[in-house]
Image (spheres, helix red, strand yellow):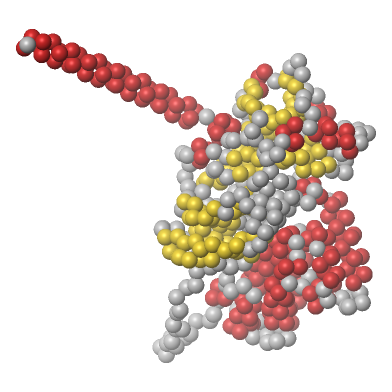
């Protein structure tokens, strides 16, 4: 009996030793493999990391550039500036052109026209089985090939946007960027990648005609709200929370807000996606605190959100046409956190009272005009700040529903720039403000600011709304351009709009 027990004990010990040996071997193998993976990742360029970790439309595939047969130059994709996208009614937001981890990005490709083709022929060429679009990041040996016939598949991630006047075709490719491109980068850093579009034809061999240019792809690793103005990742997506509505259409949008506090609860986030489904998410410190899902709300909805942590920044992302559609509209409003009441400072009899600065009036929406006049300019009811700025800022808010998303974005662009100019003027003037000079300089500032905010494009798209309104509403636009405004002179607006819109398209 004892001998049998000894045999079983030895057998059990042997089995344990074998298991230990196998475990140690697996650990060593895994460590070696992990080390090689790290070494490989460390040796990869940013373009290679993006190429390997990004998600392209279903049905696309990878191909080696070295196995690609070189095509002809006349088949190469053409340059696609933003103004051409606007001709196809795409209101491109600057944050849409910056890649961020795990965020949907759009790549736009313009393919050369085919001469003397009918609309039917053009449509057939768009969905043909033997043609595709290629995307190559930097000098990576991998090219992502997206068959053009995916445009006929619902929600495939490849969309045919439209045909430009020269017959060239514009396509939109959805790409979701992976976390790996920022995994070893400092938070808040901005990197630069490049991508090249190809025109692909599948036959006896895969033939690729590369564009004769590269597209820049800024990569934002975390918030860029502190980025310098000349940073390629700097966008208009960062702002102090102002409770203003943000509206858009067919391109992804990111907005970051400084909430002025690290803790809040029961903020009533409002959103509307109408009948075409869009997705809106709100995140805080990388954690999702709200997700609308892919939904067409067909009416405004509100939901309570809150946050508690170490950051004051809340991020809102919009993924339009999430269900594969191509034409949508949406808006949202993130309410601000009401700060605690403050006790006004008492006069100090032993030292002079400091003068009010422009910063004391900031983030008060239209009331900022009134605040600046009360505390700095003192020009009264006939001065620019009250008779024009305050009046027509409120007038626009009252008529917001009349404007298209492009019109709303125009005012979101103009208002802070006008205020920035006025604040600078008042700061330089000190305690000696010349009200007539302020009015003259303020009106002069309108033209470059309006131009930079795409005034020509916006007024062309919103002409019917302006024609419905009295000249009191038209007067929100630069006085030098509409000085002759009267109820009977709406023809002057038409004469102004059409030449300016044509000039914008030609440029």
Is residue 188 something one can see in this rendering?
A: no
- Residue 180's spot in the image, x, y percent? 50, 37
- Residue 455's spot in the image, x, y percent? 78, 62
Name the residue nearer the viewer: 392 or 189: 392
**211 relative position to 182: left or right:** right
Q: What's the residue at 57%, 76% (across, down)?
A: 361
Q: What's the residue at 73%, 40% (across, down)?
A: 159
The answer to which image quadrant residue 387 occupies is bottom right
Name the residue nearer the viewer: 177 or 159: 159
Name the residue nearer the viewer: 185 or 23: 23
Q: What's the residue at 58%, 51% (across, down)?
A: 293
- Residue 470's spot in the image, x, y percent? 83, 76
- Residue 276's spot in the image, x, y percent? 69, 52
Q: Is residue 190 above or below residue 440?
A: above
Q: Which residue is at the far bottom?
A: 349
The answer to which image quadrant residue 52 occupies is top right
């Amino acid at each position: 009996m004892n001998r049998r027990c000894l045999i079983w004990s030895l057998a059990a010990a042997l089995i344990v030793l074998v298991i230990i040996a196998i475990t140690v071997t697996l650990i060593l193998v895994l460590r070696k493999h992990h080390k090689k993976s790290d070494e490989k990742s460390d040796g990869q360029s940013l373009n290679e990391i993006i190429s390997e970790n990004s998600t392209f439309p279903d049905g696309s595939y990878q191909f080696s550039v070295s196995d690609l047969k070189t095509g002809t130059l006349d088949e190469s994709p053409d340059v696609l500036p933003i103004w051409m996208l606007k001709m196809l009614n795409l209101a491109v937001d600057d944050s849409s052109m910056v890649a961020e981890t795990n965020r949907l990005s759009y790549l736009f490709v313009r393919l050369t026209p085919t001469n003397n083709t009918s609309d039917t022929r053009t449509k057939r060429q768009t969905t043909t089985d033997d043609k595709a679009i290629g995307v190559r990041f930097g000098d990576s040996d991998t090219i992502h090939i997206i068959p053009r016939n995916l445009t006929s598949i619902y929600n495939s991630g490849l969309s045919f946007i439209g045909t430009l006047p020269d017959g060239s075709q514009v396509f939109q490719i959805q790409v979701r960027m992976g976390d790996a491109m920022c995994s070893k980068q400092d938070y808040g850093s901005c990197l630069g990648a490049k991508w090249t579009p190809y025109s692909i034809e599948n036959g006896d061999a895969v033939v690729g005609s590369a564009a004769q240019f590269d597209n820049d792809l800024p990569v934002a690793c975390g918030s860029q709200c502190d980025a310098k103005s000349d940073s390629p990742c700097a966008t208009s997506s960062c702002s102090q929370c102002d409770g203003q509505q943000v509206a858009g259409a067919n391109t992804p949008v990111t907005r970051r807000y400084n909430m002025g506090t690290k803790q809040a609860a029961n903020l009533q986030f409002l959103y509307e996606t109408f009948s075409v489904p869009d997705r809106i998410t709100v995140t805080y410190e990388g954690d999702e605190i709200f997700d609308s899902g892919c939904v067409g709300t067909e009416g405004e909805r509100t939901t309570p959100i809150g946050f508690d942590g170490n950051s004051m920044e809340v991020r809102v992302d919009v993924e339009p046409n999430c269900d594969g559609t191509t034409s949508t509209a949406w808006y949202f409003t993130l309410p601000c956190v009401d700060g605690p009441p403050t006790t006004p400072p008492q006069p100090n009899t032993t030292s002079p009272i400091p003068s009010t600065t422009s910063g004391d009036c900031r983030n008060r929406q239209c009331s900022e005009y009134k605040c600046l006049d009360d505390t700095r300019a003192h020009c009264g009811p006939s001065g620019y700040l009250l008779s024009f700025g305050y009046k027509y800022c409120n007038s626009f808010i009252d008529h917001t529903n009349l404007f298209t998303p492009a019109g709303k974005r125009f005012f979101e662009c103009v208002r802070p720039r006008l205020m920035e100019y006025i604040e600078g003027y008042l700061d330089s003037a000190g305690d000696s403000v010349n009200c007539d000079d302020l009015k003259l300089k303020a009106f002069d500032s309108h033209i470059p600011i309006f131009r930079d905010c795409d005034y020509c494009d916006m007024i062309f798209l919103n002409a019917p709304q302006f024609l419905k309104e009295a000249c009191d509403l038209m007067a929100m636009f630069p006085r030098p351009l509409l000085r002759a405004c009267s109820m009977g002179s709406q023809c002057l607006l038409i004469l102004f709009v059409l030449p300016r819109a044509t000039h914008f398209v030609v440029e």
